Image (tube, helix red, strand yellow):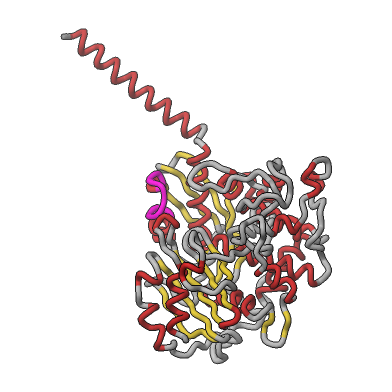
């Protein structure tokens, strides 16, 4: 009996030692997947606290943990409001991550060693006059009571979808209906995720109109000069036909999660990847290609400060997107694939710019030729994607299945964010929320219901 007790004690001690050593190893060498999780949490909390003004605990609970992997429930967060820093880890010690807020550039994941240099980058504040609350939208912020024909639609949970946070309907240049979830309102900046890609395309269009770049340019980066990548054109990146090897799968350590949460220089990381197809021969959706677009257009400025000021000077201020914050990586490259925060009304302003053929009031902000590019579907994508970082069909299904016109243009984010633009009807429908694709929500039903109601 005593022998059994001794062996039992030894077994317990051995198991405890194994657990302690295992925990020590994970603490010292955290798996990359855990670092992606804590990096994602730090970034999302940071942006929502410092840009949207939301409560950190609420964001951790509702935005990070509720819709995410069960391991995310182990994450703890600390917010330093004075330094603009959010620190996260699992169980207070595993896979620590940091996100830093910078004025005008939003938040970015950083290492402790990067903080000092990253803090040196900021973007200038808005130069546009403060919003006039008395002027009607979009010139100001005054919105009359909504069209009564939309009341039942915007109150229909099935149509606006689970976890919807904002819906704004624009008809003939005016907001005719809007609704917000509890805790959100017309002043809350919300993340667009991949809707940001179309905004990045617009910045390229603005620079092309100013003669700062040629959309047909090749030999985009010095590190591509010695191989087949030198033949990749800016137009290939805009259409997602570059042939660069990039894995867009989420939920694991892939190219997209590595780029967004583990790499200190996102553009350099994607630029280092090889090709797996000739340019123009294959469509493959890739956030990495959009980051390369940002890296390229920013390289056309001799001063980094000019590039950092450009989105606000050239686009946001002219159309009154005062809330817009396009976030940058630690080196200052805009994450043009994923990270633009703006109020639903400001997202609607951008949709209206597309609906009005690039015109804002009496000013032609974007050339009609570039708007045509944004609306032109590519052959290689089977007609689904355009030559200007937008979609010709809503998520998953063909629009014709919902009786939507073929001209309908879509901006789509991976958590159910969408903007539908139907120029001939003067219709823009913005829908923002936190609705993963696995839920099965289709914004086409909402857009068609709005169209029918406004006939």
* Front position in the image: 98 or 73: 73
Q: In the rendering, at what x and y percent does residue 88 appear?
A: 47, 48
Quarter residue 348 falls in: bottom right
Q: In the rendering, at what x and y percent does residue 121 appear?
A: 69, 58
Image quarter where the N terminus lies is: top left
Q: Is residue 319 magenta?
A: no
In the displayed structure image, the side of residue 217 where residue 100 appears, left or right: left
Tag count: 0
* Front position in the image: 340 or 102: 340
Residue visible at 50% across and 40% down? Answer: 33
Q: Which residues are magenta?
A: 64-72
Q: In the rendering, at what x and y percent does residue 179 appear?
A: 42, 77
The answer to whether residue 169 is visible is yes
Residue 59, above or below 367: above
Direction left: furthest residue: 1
In the displayed structure image, the side of residue 11 where residue 384 appears, left or right: right
* Front position in the image: 453 or 226: 453
Residue 455, above or below 97: below
Residue 407, above or below 79: below
Residue visible at 45% across and 30% down? Answer: 24
Q: Is residue 66 magenta?
A: yes
Residue visible at 51% across and 54% down? Answer: 86
Residue visible at 53% across and 41% down? Answer: 253
The answer to whether residue 322 is visible is no
Q: In the rendering, at what x and y percent does residue 455 appear?
A: 47, 86
């Amino acid at each position: 009996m005593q022998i059994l007790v001794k062996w039992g004690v030894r077994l317990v001690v051995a198991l405890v030692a194994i657990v302690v050593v295992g925990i020590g190893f994970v603490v010292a060498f955290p798996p990359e997947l855990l670092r992606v999780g804590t990096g994602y949490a730090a970034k999302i909390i940071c942006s929502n606290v410092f840009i949207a003004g939301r409560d950190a605990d609420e964001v951790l609970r509702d935005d990070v943990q509720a819709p995410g992997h069960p391991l995310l429930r182990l994450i703890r967060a600390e917010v330093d409001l004075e330094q603009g820093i959010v620190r996260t880890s699992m169980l207070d010690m595993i896979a620590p991550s940091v996100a830093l807020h910078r004025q005008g550039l939003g938040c970015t994941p950083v290492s402790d060693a990067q903080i000092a240099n990253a803090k040196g980058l900021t973007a200038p504040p808005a130069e546009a006059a403060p919003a006039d609350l008395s002027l009607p939208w979009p010139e100001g912020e005054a919105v009359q009571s909504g069209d009564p024909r939309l009341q039942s639609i915007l109150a229909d949970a099935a149509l606006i979808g689970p976890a919807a946070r904002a819906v704004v309907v624009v008809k003939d240049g005016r907001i005719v209906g809007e609704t917000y979830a509890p805790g959100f309102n017309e002043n809350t900046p919300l993340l667009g995720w991949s809707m940001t890609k179309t905004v990045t395309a617009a910045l390229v269009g603005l620079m092309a109109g100013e003669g700062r770049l040629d959309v047909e340019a090749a030999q985009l980066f010095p590190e591509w000069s010695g191989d087949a990548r030198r033949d990749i054109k800016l137009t290939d990146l805009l259409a997602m036909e570059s042939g660069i090897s990039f894995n867009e799968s989420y939920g694991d350590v892939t190219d997209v999660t590595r780029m967004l949460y583990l790499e200190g220089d996102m553009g350099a990381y994607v630029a280092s990847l090889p090709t797996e197809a000739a340019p123009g021969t294959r469509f493959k959706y890739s956030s990495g290609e959009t980051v390369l677009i940002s890296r390229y257009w920013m390289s056309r400025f001799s001063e980094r400060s000019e590039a950092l000021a450009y989105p606000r000077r050239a686009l946001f201020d002219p159309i009154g997107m005062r809330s817009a914050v396009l976030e940058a990586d630690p080196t200052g490259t805009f994450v043009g694939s994923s990270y633009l925060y703006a109020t639903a009304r400001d997202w609607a302003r951008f949709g209206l710019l597309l609906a009005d053929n690039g015109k804002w009031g009496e000013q032609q902000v974007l050339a009609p030729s570039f708007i045509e590019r944004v609306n032109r579907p590519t052959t290689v994508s089977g007609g689904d994607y355009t030559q200007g970082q937008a979609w010709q069909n809503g998520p998953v299904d063909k629009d014709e299945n919902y009786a939507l016109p073929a001209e309908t243009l879509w901006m789509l984010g991976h958590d159910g964010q969408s903007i539908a633009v139907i120029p001939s009807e003067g219709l823009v429908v913005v829908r923002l929320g936190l609705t993963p694709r696995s839920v099965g929500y289709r914004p086409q039903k909402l857009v068609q219901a709005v169209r029918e109601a406004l006939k």
